Amino acid sequence: MSFPTASPHDVPPDAARDRQWEWHAPQTMSERAAPEPVEAKPGGTPGRGALVAIAVVAVLALAVAGLVAVLGDGGSPEGPAAEGCEGADCGPETATSPGPQTMEIPDGYLGVASLGALTPAPGPPWAPYAGPGADELLAEDAHALEIQHTATWISYLMVGRLGEFGLVADPENLREAAAEIVDTWVFDYPYSGTTGLERSEPVLTDTRVDSHPAVLLETRVTWDTLDASPDMYEDVALLLVDPGEEGIFLGVAAVPESGTAHYAGAVDALMQTTFRHNTYLP
């Protein structure tokens, strides 16, 4: 394909407030005014006032014992372990919940974070071209590789989320969508300065990729003359997958005559795509 111009495209974490509790140790009995001696009634039986005083003393004693048990040796909610504690880990714990994260794309893979997709890269001589997260032909959130044959002529391998470019890919009819997309690809975008541009009748194969319904379309594009290269043809493969994430996965391998030996490996890589790697999908 001729060299197109690619145009690639954070919410700070929520702040959390620690709640600090202020504890006040109650006055001990020694700090309180001692109750007046109770005068017993004849016969050795305390009167009503003595019974009330005894009950009050018992309640206060239980309250002091309970607070000492709660406060512990250190006199703080954290107990003895809090003594000498320093740093962000000290103090009351606060509950946190995971926020949105960027999917990690390991070395040797192409990734589409919005679909949780990873595609193994074929390896040299394929080299980085765009992304991840770029806007490419027909796709957004795209990741692409290239083999450069001349300054303006490359082999191209791309994965991404099918973009909104006027075609609606119905998950129930991926075959029809693939046929429309290949015509957009061939006759509207990558080829310039050509005469006699044609494509062969597309071969469509219903298949499954990582257990998801998919369609693979393959065709050969030919021309009489091409300004960018002396090549006479290019093989194109389009892969559409419905991973059930309210988006369609698009894979493209466009390999001209100069890179014919690398076409099969590129298509095989697309077919090995797996999904659900992003645990923060909406």
Image (cartoon, grey):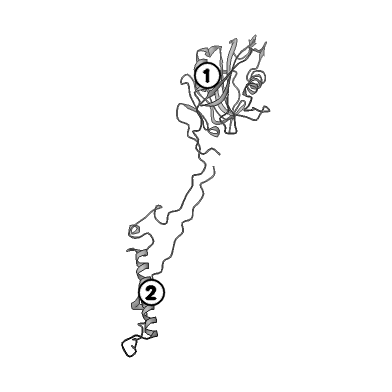
Residue 134 horizontal/vertical position (percent): 57, 30
75 or 175: nearer the viewer = 175
Q: To which quarter of the image does residue 187 belong?
A: top right
On the question of residue 152 being in view, the answer is no
The numbered dot on residue 267 is 1
Identify the residue at horizontal 62%, vertical 24% (top origin): 174
Q: Are marks 2 and 1 in contact (CB under 8 Å)?
A: no
61 w.r.t. 46: above or below: above
How would you rate the neighbour count of disc 2 (Cα within 10 Å): few for under 14, some for 14-19, many for 20 or more? few
Q: To which quarter of the image does residue 239 belong?
A: top right
Q: How many numbered markers are drawn?
A: 2
Q: Using residue 71 as the reference point, say whether residue 9 is left or right of it.
A: right
On the question of residue 68 being in view, the answer is yes
Identify the residue at horizontal 55%, vertical 11% (top origin): 257
Residue 20 horizontal/vertical position (percent): 44, 61
Between disc 2 and disc 1, whose residue precedes? Answer: 2
Badge 2 element: helix
Residue 58 horizontal/vertical position (percent): 36, 75
Kindly identify which residue carries mark 2.
59
Badge 1 element: helix
Residue 233 horizontal/vertical position (percent): 59, 11
Q: Using residue 162 as the reference point, say whether residue 269 is left or right of it.
A: left
Image quarter (top left, top right, bottom left or bottom right) of the C terminus: top right
Identify the residue at horizontal 36%, vertical 71% (top origin): 62
Q: Using residue 249 as the reference point, say whether residue 44 is left or right of it.
A: left
The numbered dot on residue 190 is none
204 w.r.t. 23: above or below: above
Q: Which residue is farthest left?
A: 44
Residue flagged by tag 2: what amino acid is it?
Val
Q: Which residue is farthest front?
A: 43
Identify the residue at horizontal 41%, vertical 66% (top origin): 23
